Image (cartoon, rainbow, N blue to C red):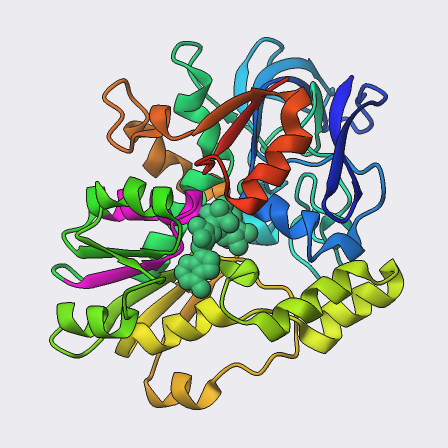
Amino acid sequence: MRAVTWQGRRKVSVDTVPDPAIKEPTDAIIRVTSTNICGSDLHLYEVLGAFMTQGDILGHEAMGVVEEVGREVDGLQVGDRVVIPFNISCGHCFMCDHGLQSQCETTQNRDQGTGAALFGYSKLYGEVAGGQAEYLRVPQAQYTHIKVPQDGPDERYVYLSDVLPTAWQAVEYADVPDGGTLVVLGLGPIGSMACRIAAHRKSCRVIGVDLVDERLTRAREYCTDVIDLRRDDAQDMVLGHTDGRGADSVIDAVGMEAHGSPIAGTMQTAAGFLPSPVGRVVMKQAGVDRLAALNSAIALVRRGGTISLSGVYGGAADPINMMTLFDKQIQLRMGQANVKKWVPDIMPLLTAEDPLGVEQFATHRLPLSAAPEAYETFQKKEDGMVKVVLSP
Ligand SMILES: NC(=O)c1ccc[n+]([C@@H]2O[C@H](COP(=O)([O-])OP(=O)(O)OC[C@H]3O[C@@H](n4cnc5c(N)ncnc54)[C@H](O)[C@@H]3O)[C@@H](O)[C@H]2O)c1
Ligand SMILES: [Zn+2]
Ligand SMILES: [Zn+2]
């Protein structure tokens, strides 16, 4: 089959690789019909490269049709149309029972000290082959799937793999009160979907923040106001909307690729370049996060407010501003999305009326073979690219 593989820092290619096969009785194989590129893939493309092996198949936002099921996979049949959650979870452990599927105890990576295995996400998360490919092996398939109706375009459902539940969890964790103010930092797919969900579900002011024209333009439709970091003073504007107090809640949908801390940026780049074993140690222990977005969140939230982090952070040693967090009495909630937990809430919104605008959400629909150029364009934020759906 054809698959998108990681080849080195800022280099992916489309190769012919062996078709996946059932290895465990709990596996299924799906034929992929749509598979997205995510902001999280950019971490692998760049700063988490030290955790990748040449030839790893990328991708964690796939949907398709079931081709084959292992003998212990009940409730799933050949021909079913399914979206595959980015986290692999069993559905019967303590964590899954508590709605914490991203911490599944059956697929946790204890050797790495990390949570549930993820598709296409490096040594840190189980080195499971990803879904930017013609076929995908789905472990724990009895639970790691979302059945969707046979009708309607792929775009109606494909974001159930990641964008929708991640943005939904971001809004839930932000806990914005009625009539309150929510600031969303970063208007990529996650941040812009969080704005849409908050505008749809909550009676609150939504203020989106970014520094790329088309991302600000797209968000304007769903936001009370947008802040362009290139020219606006975010602090002044947020205080202006909130009687000088700051936002009740802030979502950080940026993570460690933030623009704004050039020195840490150089260190991250250096870690991406180091030979892998050394690079991994540098990344995990020396701490090379760029905390610009988190620091903005701490500054913009009001005293007693809540920060909800969906942006991914990777290092362990960067100082976070504990004094201000403590003094302002800030609540901080974060983590990988527990995809399956939110699906029942989201599914009723995936209708022909399309209140969240998912069917027009992708800016680019490209063949799988275009992945190398698409990664580069997406990383450089060129050509108005915000979300890419690939067709194998
Ligand atoms: N928690 C989860 O389960 C989960 C799931 C998916 C993605 N993510 C993470 O969420 C983050 C966003 O994902 P995405 O796909 O939307 O990525 P993206 O890279 O397309 O979006 C990030 C946006 O932030 C903007 N930005 C950069 N620096 C900023 C700053 N200092 N202040 C405000 N905005 C800034 C960028 O211009 C961009 O529009 C990534 O870190 C990704 O890894 C987390
Ligand atoms: Zn993703
Ligand atoms: Zn589990």
Extent of the magenta region: 180-198
Quadrant in which residue 21 is drawn: top right
Q: Is residue 118 magenta?
A: no
Q: Residue at x 84, y 46 (%)?
A: 53
Observer-nearest of 279 and 152: 279
Q: Is residue 380 above or below residue 364?
A: below
Position of 354 with respect to 20 (left or right) is: left
- Res 337 seen here: no
Question: What x and y, as percent, mark residue 367?
Answer: 61, 18
Position of 332 with respect to 220 (left or right) is: right
Which quarter of the rendered picture does the C terminus lie within?
A: top right
Q: Is residue 193 magenta?
A: yes
Question: What x and y, as percent, mark residue 63?
Answer: 56, 23
Q: Residue at x 21, y 40 (%)?
A: 221
Q: How many marks?
A: 0
Question: What x and y, as percent, mark residue 333?
Answer: 43, 66
Q: Residue at x 36, y 62 (%)?
A: 230
Position of 261 with respect to 219 (left or right) is: right
Which quarter of the rendered picture does the N terminus lie within?
A: top right
Question: What x and y, as percent, mark residue 204?
Answer: 16, 56
Observer-nearest of 169 and 281: 281
Q: Residue at x 39, y 54 (%)?
A: 170
- Res 27 seen here: yes
